[in-house]
Image (cartoon, rainbow, N blue to C red):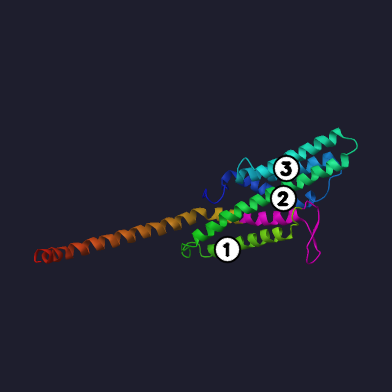
Amino acid sequence: MDKDVSKITIMSNENELENLFLNTYDAKNLNVSPKNKTELLEKYQKYTELLYQYLRTVSGDFIFPVNNEIRAMLGHLSEYVESDEKKDKELQRAYGHLRRINLDALKIICDDFDKFFSKKMKKIYKYDYRDTLKSFLKIYAEKYFTAKNKYIDAQTKESVGSDSEKENDDKTGEEHNVILLYFDAAKEYIELKQYYEKYRKDIIKVKLQANIGKIISFLVIGFCLIVSFADIWPVIQGWILNR
């Protein structure tokens, strides 16, 4: 991957974790307030920890916003254990940070994939895939813009600075689950990643053939120029001597 585009890395050994995340992550469950510490930790261990591990795989080991929210959640859980009077408040505060862990992680995934595949699309459009991958560019573009539109939709519907379980669209009044919106967008980006990986070797092959063709053309042109110059060099010499 291009280091100037994103920290994301595409590795074959992440596929198992990736599929597990896609098939088991439950944004609807995470949108329901826990009744006690046990339920909150269950949500974290069953869903959030999986998301966190996948995020570390694709975006690096240190993700400050997410790590900061994890520390804050654990801090409120500690207060929950020690306090008798503020248990409900501390539990809700911990749950708020649990939501932010998931939102921040999903946003990072969407943002990093969007940057990478946006620039990648500009690069691959420079080559002709019609002979080997007839519909590759069309499907790639469709998948990218599907993911992009869902990402924009999630950003638009998210209330600024809100951690509420249900948020209302300002225009329609419709309730929506922001975690689910970002998960749907992240899922589309991941499916785009899987599609890209499927044809990655073919893409490299097409680019290599095109670049070899350019080098050969350059060499042929250079050879023709040298031959042409050799033919006219005696004429130039004669003109110089006769001056």
Question: Which sits earlier in the primary sequence, circle 1 or circle 2?
Answer: 2
Q: How many marks?
A: 3
Which residue is disc 1 drawn over? Answer: 141
Amino acid type, label 3: Glu
Amino acid type, label 2: Leu
Residues shaded magenta? 162-191
Which sits in the foreground, 45 or 66? Answer: 66
Q: Residue furthest right?
A: 85
Assign a secondary structure to mark 2.
helix
User: Residue 164 in magenta?
Assistant: yes
Are the residues at dot 1 and dot 3 in contact (C-beta closer than 8 Å)? no
Q: CA distance from mark 1 to mark 2?
A: 26 Å
Which sits in the foreground, 28 or 19? Answer: 28
Task: From the top left corner, tell me how far across and down residue 235 is, in percent.
Answer: 14, 66
Which residue is disc 3 drawn over? Answer: 69
Assign a secondary structure to mark 3.
helix
Q: Which mark is residue 103?
A: 2
Question: Which sits earlier in the primary sequence, circle 1 or circle 3?
Answer: 3
Amino acid type, label 1: Ala
Q: Is residue 18 left or right of residue 73?
A: left
Q: Is residue 224 left or right of residue 105?
A: left
Measuring 75% from the left and 40% from the top, which residue is drawn there?
72
Which sits in the foreground, 223 or 95? Answer: 95
Q: Residue furthest front?
A: 243
Residue 37's image quarter?
top right
Assign a secondary structure to mark 1.
helix
Measuring 71% from the left and 61% from the top, which residue is drawn there?
156
